[in-house]
Structure formats: structure tokens, C-alpha cells
Image (tube, rainbow, N blue to C red):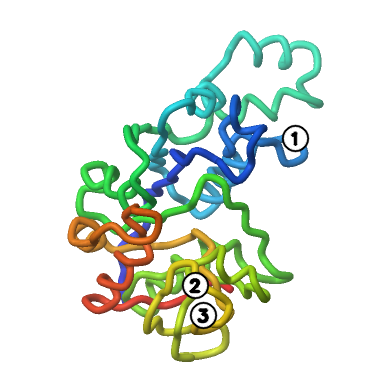
């Protein structure tokens, strides 16, 4: 059982968003609205709800809107607080109460593994959460939010944890798919992760969904990872290396 507190989160948000073209030509995919907030705000809020107080967002070209969104804007909050505080004020004022958000720029698009490697100095030897900036999770009835489940799993099993979900039919080719051994209900010890396999070659229908708690050993694993699918440094390949050294389990389904 590990007692280290998870206080840092890394949010990769440097991807080009090609799957959402043409809307992402002028707007980061992480800033696409869901109801009344951009996707990445839901991600940051999930991290804060778990008690995380150190947030690092990995950005890239054309991502300035993300930094602008989380800025403190007194010229906006003051009129709201004076005239319509109950209706609008809280929606922008609560940014003032959040932990500081830090940014590191990924200058070239070399894969998710490379993006996370940019966080090495910031994490400074501590275990940390990774939440993809374009991925919202919704807990099942009565369940904790996904990041809380991952942190609990990290503390219980003493190894890195990751979230998965069932993928149907041809959709498996959109995921990293796990081969796992059941430890208990909804918990698997990872044997292998296969990046975007065909439906025929997939070892299961359980796909990785971009939420993790990782030990700092992941950085050495990333450095040793050759370029894989798409000519990029795939995090799934690095996780396979990490798994052989320190173990890896699922803790949120």
C-alpha cells in the first residue's frame, strides 16, 4: 500500500484535433463547449475535486485560448458581482479560488508519450495523475469520480493505475486495448496494451480512456520507447515497459 499523496496532475492538450476538423482549424479541441463550459474545464474541475492542487497543462501551437480561458478577469467578475452575481458571478469568480495552473509547450507533435515527458521536471520525482484535456468521464451511479478511483487504486495496489471502458466492434481500432488478468470486480492486472488494433487482432474489448495515475519511473520508460504507431512516441508502448518494471492495474471502469 502506498501512502504518497497525489497532488499533481498533467493535462496533455497539445494535439491538433484533426478528428474534429473543420471546427478545430481555429479553436482548440479542448475548448469545444459541452453545455456551458469547454471540455478542458470539466477535466480541471475533476482534478481539483480530488484534492489535487498543482496543475500542469501541456499545450502546443494554436492553444493560447486555453491559457486565456483560465486567466483571472476582474473586468468581467466585478460587473457580475455587482449586478448579477447569483446568476453569472460564480461561473467566473471561482477561477480566483483555484490552484495556479502552469503551462509547458510541446513544440512538435511527437505523441502522447512525448507530451508527458515534458512534465518530468515539474513532477520532480512525485507520482502524478494524467488526464487528457479532451476526455470527460462520468461516474456510474454511486461511484466516485474516475480520478478518485485511480488514486484509491494506486494507494491499494501500490502501482500505477489507468481507466478503461468497453469498446464495441470496430471501435477497438480507436483505442489502446488491454490484455488483463482479473484481480477483483472491475480491476485487472495489465499484461499488455495494444495500440489501436484491428477488431480481429484486439486482445479484448477493454479500451484505455486517457486517465492515469503514474509513478515517476514512467519518464525513463518514455525515453526508452521507440517511435511506434503513426511514427509517434505512444504512451501505451511506454506503459508496457513500465508495467514490466513496476506493475500496472485498472482502477476505473
Q: In terms of image quadrants, where is residue 212? A: bottom left
Q: In terms of image quadrants, where is residue 38? A: top right
Q: In terms of image quadrants, where is residue 169? A: bottom right
Q: Do the residues labelled 1 and 2 touch (CB within 8 Å)?
A: no
User: Residue 151 in the image: x percent, y percent?
Assistant: 44, 65
Structural distance between the alpha carbons of marks 3 and 2: 5 Å
Q: Are marks 3 and 1 in contact (CB under 8 Å)?
A: no
Front position in the image: 108 or 3: 108
Q: Name the residue: 23% across, 60% down.
A: 226
Q: If the image is split into quadrants, where does the N terminus sit?
A: bottom left
Against 228, residue 14 (above or below) is above
Checking the image for residue 202, the label placed there is 3
Q: Name the residue: 36% across, 59% down.
A: 234
As drawn, is 248 to the left or to the right of 63?
Answer: left
Nearer to us of marks 3 and 1 is 3
Question: On the image, numbered disc 1 is attached to which residue?
Answer: 36
Indicate the secondary structure of the residue bearing disc 3.
Answer: loop
Indicate the secondary structure of the residue bearing disc 1.
Answer: loop
Question: On the image, numbered disc 2 is attached to which residue?
Answer: 197
Q: Do the residues labelled 3 and 2 touch (CB within 8 Å)?
A: yes
- Nearest to N terminus: mark 1 or mark 2: 1
As drawn, is 184 to the left or to the right of 54?
Answer: right
Front position in the image: 171 or 53: 171
User: Residue 253 in the image: x percent, y percent?
Assistant: 59, 73
Crowd band around label 3 with a 10 angstrom C-alpha radius: few (<14), some (14–19), many (20+)? many
Crowd band around label 1 with a 10 angstrom C-alpha radius: few (<14), some (14–19), many (20+)? few
Front position in the image: 194 or 56: 194
As drawn, is 130 to the left or to the right of 88?
Answer: left
Q: Name the residue: 25% across, 76% down.
A: 246
Structural distance between the alpha carbons of marks 1 and 2: 35 Å
- Nearest to N terminus: mark 3 or mark 1: 1
Amino acid at each position: 500500500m502506498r501512502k504518497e499523496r497525489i497532488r499533481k496532475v498533467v493535462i496533455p492538450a497539445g494535439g491538433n484535433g484533426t478528428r474534429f476538423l473543420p471546427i478545430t482549424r481555429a479553436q482548440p479541441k479542448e475548448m469545444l463547449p459541452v453545455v456551458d463550459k469547454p471540455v478542458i474545464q470539466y477535466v480541471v474541475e475533476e482534478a481539483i475535486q480530488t484534492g489535487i492542487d498543482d496543475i500542469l497543462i501541456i499545450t502546443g501551437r494554436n492553444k493560447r485560448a486555453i491559457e486565456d480561458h483560465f486567466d483571472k478577469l476582474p473586468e468581467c467578475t466585478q460587473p457580475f458581482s455587482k449586478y448579477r452575481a447569483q446568476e453569472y458571478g460564480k461561473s467566473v469568480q471561482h477561477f480566483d479560488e483555484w490552484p495556479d495552473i502552469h503551462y509547458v509547450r510541446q513544440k512538435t507533435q511527437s505523441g502522447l508519450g512525448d507530451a508527458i515527458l515534458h512534465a518530468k521536471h515539474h513532477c520532480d520525482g512525485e507520482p502524478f495523475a494524467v488526464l487528457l484535456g479532451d476526455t470527460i468521464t462520468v461516474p456510474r451511479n454511486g461511484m466516485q469520480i474516475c480520478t478518485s478511483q485511480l488514486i484509491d487504486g494506486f494507494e491499494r495496489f501500490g502501482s500505477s493505475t489507468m481507466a478503461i471502458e468497453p469498446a464495441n466492434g470496430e471501435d477497438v481500432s480507436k483505442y489502446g486495448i488491454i490484455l488483463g488478468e482479473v484481480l477483483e470486480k472491475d480491476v485487472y492486472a495489465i499484461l499488455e496494451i495494444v495500440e489501436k488494433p484491428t477488431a480481429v487482432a484486439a486482445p479484448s474489448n477493454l479500451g484505455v480512456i486517457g486517465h492515469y495515475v503514474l509513478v515517476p519511473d514512467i519518464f525513463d520508460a518514455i525515453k526508452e520507447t521507440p517511435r511506434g504507431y503513426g511514427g509517434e512516441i505512444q504512451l501505451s508502448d511506454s506503459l508496457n515497459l513500465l508495467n514490466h518494471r513496476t506493475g500496472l492495474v485498472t482502477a476505473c471502469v
